[in-house]
Image (cartoon, helix red, strand yellow):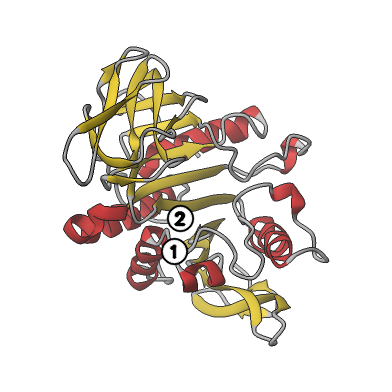
Amino acid sequence: MSVFEIEGVKAAPGERAFGYIETSRTASQIPIHIPFNIINGAHDGPTLLVSAAIHGAEIIGTLGLGKVLRDLDESELRGTLIAAPVGNTSAFEFGTRTTYWDGQNMNRAWNMADPEGSPTAQLQHAYITKLVGNADAHIDIHSGSPDSYVWYTIYESSRGTPETIERSKHMAIAFGLEQIFRTTPVRWHGDQEDDDPESVIPTIVPEIGGGADFLKDGKRQMEVCAEGIKNVMRLMGMLDGEITHESDKIQIVDAHDEEIWAGKDHAGIMIKDCERGDFLKKGEPYASVYHPFTGEKMAEISAPSTGIVLNTGVVWPVVPQGRWLGVLGDVVEEVSLDTIDLKW
């Protein structure tokens, strides 16, 4: 092992360090930066980047990664962990999905990354070049917003070499959640169709917990997130120990492009008529909408396509027009953990 350095922040073997990547400043000269930790193991191994709170209100990854930082013993670590628990500090500060300074979404259109661009474009450029560029693999953790709940892992199934895609898939399985999306309606880390496949590193995006479930189940969400990070580190040979899962079978899913939205007649009180995992035919009821003043049923929200109800979507019943509600999908593969040989 040797000294690991990012932007002048150095960690010798068996040590850790903390610092910031400053990208620009606001009009009142408040620094715009990305805080990060380097945990440099005492033994040789790969480098893993784990980031969270790119969307500032999605903090389960921040909590889970914080637990990993508290638990980790660098004397037993092989390789290096780069930890960025709050990827977008202004979004985190104000509890929003977007950068407060320009209103842009840091997790969309990564091809706009520009060291001379908007505050978000500068953050994206620093994130890609200084953090992702120093890693062999990447976990970017998201979660539900205040009114929604999610519980699945996405892997990069269309970018990179076949070997990279297979490694991403094995990372997703190792993380430990029961459902894995290999396709999703939303382009994340997005729109980089011209990437050289050789430059893409294995990447997963766990979408884990959050929302209205936090008061009941927040500690478990944090612990499952932390264990998922450690599971990937075990897969990569960075930590000793057994990889743990919440189920002995993993569903790999293609999410439908046609999402479920609240239309112009759907504002009100929404009560879902189905459970996650239910199979719906196109046109069957997904949810009913009731008048908040009279209690009368006003409308039904129908399945836009035929598929299973995926483990994602709005759970809080007060729904405005134009709100994204959920996703249907198709199970394309069921993986038995008794038969698959996870490899890095």
Residue at 55 percent across and 74 percent down: it is 13
Give the class, few, some or many, for how many residues have Cα within 10 Å of label 1's Cα (few <14, many ≥20): many
Which three-letter amino acid code belongs to the residue tagged 2?
Met
Image quadrant assignment for residue 220: bottom left
Give the class, few, some or many, for how many residues have Cα within 10 Å of label 2's Cα (few <14, many ≥20): many
Image quadrant assignment for residue 196: top right
| Left or right: 104, with 251 as reference point | right
Which three-letter amino acid code belongs to the residue tagged 1?
Leu
Q: Residue 42 location in percent, x, y?
A: 49, 69
Q: Judge whether residue 248 can be spotted in this image.
A: no
In depth, the one of 302 and 112 nearer the eye is 302
Image quadrant assignment for residue 121: bottom right
Question: Quadrant location of the N terminus?
Answer: bottom right
In depth, the one of 138 and 181 nearer the eye is 181
Q: Determine whether the residue tagged by mark 1 lies in a helix, strand or loop.
A: loop
Q: Residue 229 location in percent, x, y?
A: 40, 54
- The relative height of residue 96 versus residue 327 in the rendered view (above or below) is below
Residue at 44 percent across and 64 percent down: it is 77
* Residue that numbered label 1 is attached to: 77
* Residue that numbered label 2 is attached to: 238
Q: Residue 225 location in percent, x, y?
A: 34, 54
The answer to whether the residue labelled 2 contacts the one labelled 1, judged by CB atoms less than 8 Å apart, is: yes
Q: Residue 187 location in percent, x, y?
A: 60, 38
- The relative height of residue 42 versus residue 78 in the rendered view (above or below) is below
Q: Judge whether residue 291 can be spotted in this image.
A: yes
- In whole angstroms, how far apart are the C-alphas of marks 2 and 1? 6 Å
